[in-house]
Structures are given as structure tokens and as C-alpha cells.
Image: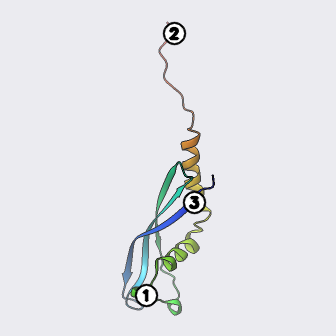
Amino acid sequence: MATTYTTTVNHMYTINTPVEGFVVNVLFTVTGTDGTNTAYINGNIQFVDQAESAFVPYNQLTESQVIAWIDAATNNQVNYHANIDGQINSMINPPVGPQAQPLPW
């Protein structure tokens, strides 16, 4: 089954320069599920180089806008999704590790 990914915005931090309510930091979680297994990764992205001309007042932001910023800034589709896929794959096919055995004598 294909993995379904969801990005959730947990916290946003703002400053009042260059304009009031300028978002500079977003904490988020990307969750993936294949219907049986679920994995997640937390992220933290800083937006210090935003174009002031693209500014949206804080109280007018939507979650989908902020998630689009996250996706663009982090290459979310590749980096975070690959990490989640690896976690799920390890749940399905656990890595084999050495096991301590009693001495044969």
C-alpha cells in the first residue's frame, strides 16, 4: 500500500521586523502511514530570507500556506518522506543484528 503523508504545523515564531508578525521559525511534524505502520519526523525551519513583498499578515495565514513554505524550503517530498519510508521499511523488515549466544562448551 502507498504511504500517505501529512504535515502538521506545531508552533510558529514571529518577530516585528521588518513588519509586525513576520514568521521566522516554524516547528512541524511530518507523519506517514501505509495503513498498518506509522512513522513521523519532527522538523524546524527558519525563514530569515523571506521576501517582504510576499508578506501575509500573521492573522491571515492558513495552514496550507505555511505547509507550502515548509515543502519549498525543505524539499519535504524527498528528504522527510524518504526518512519516513525508511522507518516504515524497518518496521516491516526489521534490521538483522547479532544476537548473543551461550558459549557452546
- The residue nearer to you, when weighing 59 against 37, is 37
Determine whether label 3 and label 2 are within 8 Å by CB. no
How many marks the image carries: the answer is 3
Mark 2 or mark 1, whichever is nearer to me: 1
Q: CA distance from mark 2 to mark 1?
A: 70 Å
Mark 1 element type: helix
Q: Closer to the N terminus: mark 3 or mark 2? A: 3
Residue 59 position within the rendered picture, expressed as x and y whole percent measured from the top left: 39, 87
Residue 4, numbered label: 3
Mark 2 element type: loop
Q: What crowding class fits label 1: few (fewer than 14 Cα within 10 Å), some (14-19), or many (20 or more)?
A: few
Residue 60, numbered label: 1
Q: Which residue is at the far top?
A: 105
Left or right, 13 with respect to 53, comes to left
Residue 104, numbered label: 2
Mark 3 or mark 2, whichever is nearer to me: 3
Residue under the image location 48 percent in, 12 percent down: 103
- Looking at the rendered structure, the kind of residue marked 2 is Pro
Residue under the image location 54 percent in, 49 percent down: 87
Q: What crowding class fits label 2: few (fewer than 14 Cα within 10 Å), some (14-19), or many (20 or more)?
A: few
| Colour scheme shown | rainbow
